[in-house]
């Protein structure tokens, strides 16, 4: 089956989806708070969209509901004191780094735990990951989003920036199951040989992306919808929109100086790209990487199991 046919067939019926993906914003707080988060670093077997079982690493937020869920503890406000305790259940030492916030942090040994503390920086999109194992931590899935909202409680991508009506966080990554097998066996992998074969948005692949409230991008006509692309993978993601044009607002918290409407935006490695999508028409449209294998599963365009394909659904 050709890719275009796959996209068309795979989207049948999505227009009827209810608006279940309403993002719940953190309650407004008058003052900076102390936020305590517990992450367990662990290895688990994860079922791919084609049924394959692959050993992955993850940071499980014991108080959250998933990497893209804004009910996770990793949505904070500028100025908050954030204490993240990492319990390491893996077979090797890791650390917790947040590019743009803290790097070269102390490692936590297998079986041990360590608390990493910082003051929430300027509003914007960030991610946390392990950097003690080179790129292996990211390649194994050891990462997650950190969303910092403005101190004044407004729905803006940065203080004084453009406002939005609702927001979605889409963490983009992928895996090469040969690397995962090597790590499972206690070894490592030469990233020069990295050729990923499974792709995810918030850890999900299509069609699961359209049945999860955090990855089905549900919108209403007339709204401005913020989408935070957070690339925690080891490849670039040229994110392409059908049906809509978007305005890139920031890349790694730096405001764009010349905003033009785009139907594709390149999300580089380690980059957080925040966009605002004006919802100009109803319907269901795909949002996907233009890197063709990114919408496949292990090199195959299965129907309907696929890669990091997102459904935009507006009514
Ligand atoms: Cu397309």
Image (spheres, helix red, strand yellow):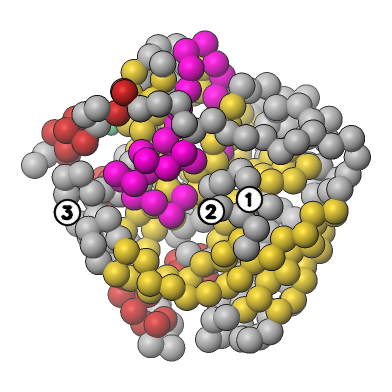
Q: Which residue is most to the right?
A: 31
| Comparing labels 3 and 2, the label whose residue is closer to the camera | 2
Q: Secondary structure at mark 3?
A: loop
Task: From the top left corner, tell me how far across and down residue 71 is, in percent.
Answer: 63, 45
Check the picture and name the quadrant holding the N terminus: top left
- Which mark identifies residue 300? 3
Query: In the rendered image of this protein, does residue 189 appear above or below residue 149?
Result: below
Q: Are marks 3 and 2 in contact (CB under 8 Å)?
A: no
Marks 2 and 1: CB-CB under 8 Å? yes
Picture quadrant where residue 111 is located: bottom right
The image quadrant where one finds ligand 1 is top left
Vertical side of 274 occupied by 175: above or below:
below
Position of residue 175 measured from the top left corner of the image (x, y, whole percent): 37, 63
For the residues marked 2 and 1, what is the alpha-carbon distance in whole angstroms? 7 Å
Most foreground residue, 2 or 264: 2
Res. 72 mark = 1
- Residue 66, which numbered label? 2
**Residue placed at 69% from the left, 46% from the top?**
75
CA distance separating discs 3 and 2: 27 Å
């Amino acid at each position: 089956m050709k890719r275009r046919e796959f996209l068309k067939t795979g989207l049948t019926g999505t227009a009827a989806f209810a608006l279940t993906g309403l993002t719940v914003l953190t309650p407004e707080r008058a003052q900076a708070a102390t936020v305590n988060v517990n992450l367990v670093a662990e290895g688990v077997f994860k079922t791919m969209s084609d049924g394959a079982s692959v050993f992955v690493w993850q940071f499980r937020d014991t108080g959250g509901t998933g990497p893209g869920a804004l009910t996770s503890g990793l949505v904070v406000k500028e100025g908050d004191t954030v204490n993240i305790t990492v319990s390491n259940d893996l077979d090797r030492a890791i650390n917790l780094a947040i590019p743009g916030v803290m790097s070269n942090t102390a490692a936590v040994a297998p079986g041990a735990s360590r608390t990493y503390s910082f003051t929430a920086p300027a509003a914007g999109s960030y991610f946390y990951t392990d950097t003690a194992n080179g790129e292996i931590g990211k390649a194994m899935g050891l990462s997650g989003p950190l969303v910092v909202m403005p101190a004044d409680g407004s729905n803006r991508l940065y203080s004084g920036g453009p406002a939005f009506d609702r927001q979605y966080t889409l963490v983009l990554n992928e895996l090469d199951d040969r690397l995962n097998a090597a790590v499972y066996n206690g070894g490592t992998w030469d990233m020069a040989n990295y050729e990923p074969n499974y792709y995810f948005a918030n850890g999900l692949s299509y069609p699961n992306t359209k049945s999860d409230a955090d990855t089905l991008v549900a919108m209403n006509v007339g709204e401005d919808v913020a989408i935070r692309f957070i690339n925690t993978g080891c490849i670039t993601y040229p994110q392409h929109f059908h049906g809509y044009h978007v305005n890139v607002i920031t890349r790694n918290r730096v405001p764009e100086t010349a905003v033009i409407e785009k139907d594709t935006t390149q999300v580089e490695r380690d980059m957080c790209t925040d966009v605002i999508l004006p919802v100009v028409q109803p319907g269901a449209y795909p949002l996907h990487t233009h890197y063709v294998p990114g919408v496949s599963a292990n090199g195959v365009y299965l129907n309907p199991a696929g890669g990091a394909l997102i459904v935009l659904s507006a009514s």
